[in-house]
Amino acid sequence: MNTASAPTTDETPLSARETGKALGAYVRPHRWAVALGLLCALVGAAGGLLQPLATKALVDRLASSESIAGILVALTVLVMLGTAVEAFGAYVLERTAESVVLAARRTLVGRLLRLRIAEWERIPPGDLMSRVTSDTTLLRAVSTQAVVSAATGAVAFVAAIVMMAFLDVVLLGVTLGVVVLVGGGAALVMPRIARATERSQAAVGEISIALERAFGAFRTVKASGAEERETARVEAVAQRAWRHGVKSAKWEAVAGSADELAVQLAFLAVLAVGGARVASGAIPVSTLIAFLLYLFYLIEPVAKLVDAVSSYQEGAAAISRIAQVERLSTEPPARQQDALPRQGTAVPGAASVRFEDVAFRHRPGLPYVHQQVSFEVPGAGMTAFVGPSGAGKSTVFALIERFYEATGGRVLVDGKDVRDWSLPQLRSAIGYVEQDAAVLAGTLRENLVFAAPGATDYEIRDVLARTKLDTLVERLPHGLDTPVGHRGSKLSGGERQRIAIARALLRKPRLLLLDEATSQLDAVNELALRDVITEVARETTVLVVAHRLSTVTGADRIVVMDAGRVRSVGTHEELVGQDRLYAQLAATQLLAPAR
């Protein structure tokens, strides 16, 4: 089957407004939990704000020789209570953050599994997987901690400034001057953090792509002696991710140290100016001590603000990559009214298929795969599609299944345009065996009932016997519950094909699509399955893409395709004398494999 080249997803970054809106969508369902965490953080911050005032009162009592026991007890209770409340709030926020990540992953996975085939073919699966795993992880910090840290940091900062203004306006002016000067420099590095983080996450996605490439052809890699070359490929991408990660860490370190630098410089300035004011009698020494305590208290809210901005920059990069996935075209989700009885029982009888001047190409600018393709399959029986490689045979099946939408003309099933069917109803009537005989990781039973989860044990045993899989089940250590390995790695190619056929037959389809379904079978098993297909074709419409003459000669009709067009339609005997291309293909006894 022809496929388009594989460009990456739309890399257009989100604006600040779009990022904030997307973040709000993730946080909104958990707003009350975030509000509770914020309240706890504010209670803890309030306790910290009262400590310098309590210390000032303590110093004043010491100067007047009054008892300080009550103040010490109050301070102790204040510290313990604030710590407990903050710990509870931190747990609430961490739990909420995990819930945000879970919700994002659910949404992404649900969307990815509904991607249109055209979208899935052009984007490396490893890149999509990295967005579900690593990118959603970055939401953990930005969705809750960054929001709460920004809020509590801002409130605590403003409250501390008010308290410092109450103590001494001159010292406050000195403090703000230093903080604004250093903070302005730190603000300049924030966009650098965002850019470095987004590039780092993109490189992590490339690592997944490189690994998926190697693991997807693991035997080929080993047989070709390419382990070192593939390792070098992955290491190069990992090195790129490391460089961007280090660059991000560098700017984060600069931003993270800015708050401490600001407070330390402010401390020196306040110490100098405040010492002079104490010496002149403008303020008592207890005021200077309390002011210095507030100054050190500022370290935490300023650090929270810096961390919140840094986390937001990282999260914005992740949200942008996640949003790129959300822009991809998907198939509509199944609706409640689309629910059908168990497969094969919804609509009786064989389905008819008709192509009316169908044209198709994957994207504008690419060559046409189909050009004015027309043929009709009235009902039960077997129709074979033959032709050279690239003739467009497999694309016929893709258009029937609505994996692709026809560019022109109409594809009709039961006289109804496939675009007017709901996808669940259309596909519930179809059994499909693709070229590579896909087998999923899991047990043999799970693979057999994958398309018909309601199949009974009797139906399973019957289809196993018909596809000659019963002997395989007997020799497996756990029978039907034996794991078949990643992509069926513990099975032979022929066994995987027979499993795919059995899976399609269990669906009891009205229309059975077999795309080179017997290409890897030996002569004995091919003959047995050909008999099964012939039997099925008595009551079901069977369409076959085949390259073996033995399969074609038994068909009720043969559609000969070449260069995206239908050359002729007829029986084997008719076409041998009427169609030159078909006669050439038949003379080889082995038709060219379809693509």
Image: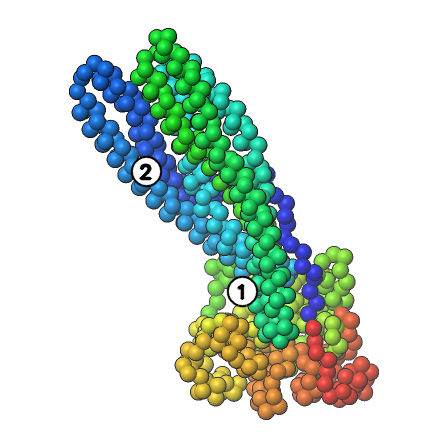
Residue for badge 1 = 424
The mark total stands at 2
Does residue 379 sit above or below 88 in this rendering? below
Residue for badge 2 = 86
Q: Secondary structure at mark 1?
A: helix
Is residue 489 among what the camera can see? yes
Does residue 477 sit above or below 346 in this rendering? below
Q: What amino acid is labelled 2 in the image?
A: Glu
Crowd tier of the residue under label 1, counting other residues whose Cα lies within 10 Å: few below 14, some 14–19, many 20 or above: some
Q: Secondary structure at mark 2?
A: helix
The quarter of the displayed image where residue 525 is located: bottom right
Does residue 593 sit above or below 188 in this rendering? below
Of badges 1 and 2, the one in the foreground is 2
The quarter of the displayed image where residue 547 is located: bottom right
**Closer to the camera in the image, 426 or 480:** 480
**Closer to the camera in the image, 195 or 321:** 195
Quadrant of the drawing holding the C terminus: bottom right
Q: Residue at left 58%, top 55%?
A: 238
Q: Residue at left 68%, top 70%?
A: 1
Side (left or right) of 300 relative to 334: left
Q: Residue at left 55%, top 79%?
A: 496
Does label 1 or label 2 sit earlier along the sequence? 2
Q: Position of residue 244 (x, y in %)?
A: 58, 47
Distance CA(mark 1)–CA(mark 2): 50 Å
